[in-house]
Amino acid sequence: MYIFQKVSLILAATAVSACTTLGQYQAQCEARTKLFPELAECIKAEIASSDSRRMQNNAGVRLYLLTAEQLSDRVRKGAISDLDARVELQKLYVELRSKEESAASARAAVAAANRAAAAANQPRTATCTQFGNFVNCTSN
């Protein structure tokens, strides 16, 4: 299951954006580290060294990093296992990703509605021809 999650995460993160995503940082760090505290530090360092101000200032990313730090502390103290920490962080990632996808979908729906409204407000022309007492019009 864990390997399936890693592969799914890498594929999903790649499909969403050509830019490096939080999921890609997580997958890269999982491949390079063995223990959860090392994983959390690696992700934090990758994001800090990235040139993405948007990611660095994102409230969801900050929550993710704080949660990773908190889970690392709990692992070091023996309160939870390394695997439990990974599962919790992955759950948070999936939740944040779902919220971002929902927000993106909502933004796309608003943009589509705005385009439809703009198209509806375009002036329409018609060509009318008279046949005796009848007028036949066709829109252009």
Image (cartoon, rainbow, N blue to C red):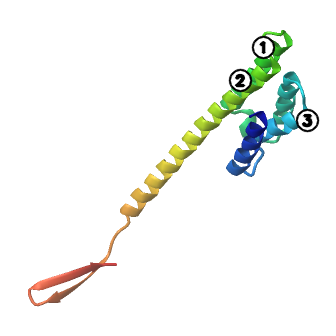
Q: What residue type is labelled 1?
A: Ile
Rendering coords of residue 115 (x, y %): 46, 58
Residue at the image position 86 percent from the left and 35 percent from the top: 29
The crowding category of the residue bearing disc 3, from other C-alpha atoms within 10 Å (few below 14, some 14 to 19, many at least 20), is few
Residue marked by disc 2: 88
Rendering coords of residue 63 (x, y %): 69, 25
Residue 80, labelled with which disc?
Answer: 1
Tag 1, which secondary structure? loop
Towards the viewer: 69 or 81: 81
Residue at the image position 8 percent from the left and 86 percent from the top: 133
Q: Counting residues from the N terminus, which is met first, the one under dot 2 or under dot 3?
A: 3
State how far apart marks 2 and 1 are (Cα).
10 Å
Q: Quadrant of residue 20?
A: top right
State how far apart marks 3 and 1 are (Cα).
22 Å
Q: In this view, does 109 lie above or below 66?
A: below
Residue marked by disc 3: 32
Cβ–Cβ below 8 Å for labels 2 and 3?
Answer: no
Towards the viewer: 59 or 11: 11
The crowding category of the residue bearing disc 2, from other C-alpha atoms within 10 Å (few below 14, some 14 to 19, many at least 20), is some
Which residue is farthest bottom? 132
Q: What residue type is labelled 2?
A: Glu
Cβ–Cβ below 8 Å for labels 2 and 1?
Answer: yes
Cβ–Cβ below 8 Å for labels 3 and 1?
Answer: no
Q: Is residue 60 visible?
A: yes
Tag 2, which secondary structure? helix
State how far apart marks 2 and 3 are (Cα).
20 Å
Rendering coords of residue 26 (x, y %): 80, 35
Tag 3, which secondary structure? helix
Q: In which quarter of the image is residue 31?
A: top right
Is 72 left, or right, of 134 in this rendering?
Answer: right
Residue 49, labelled with which disc?
Answer: none
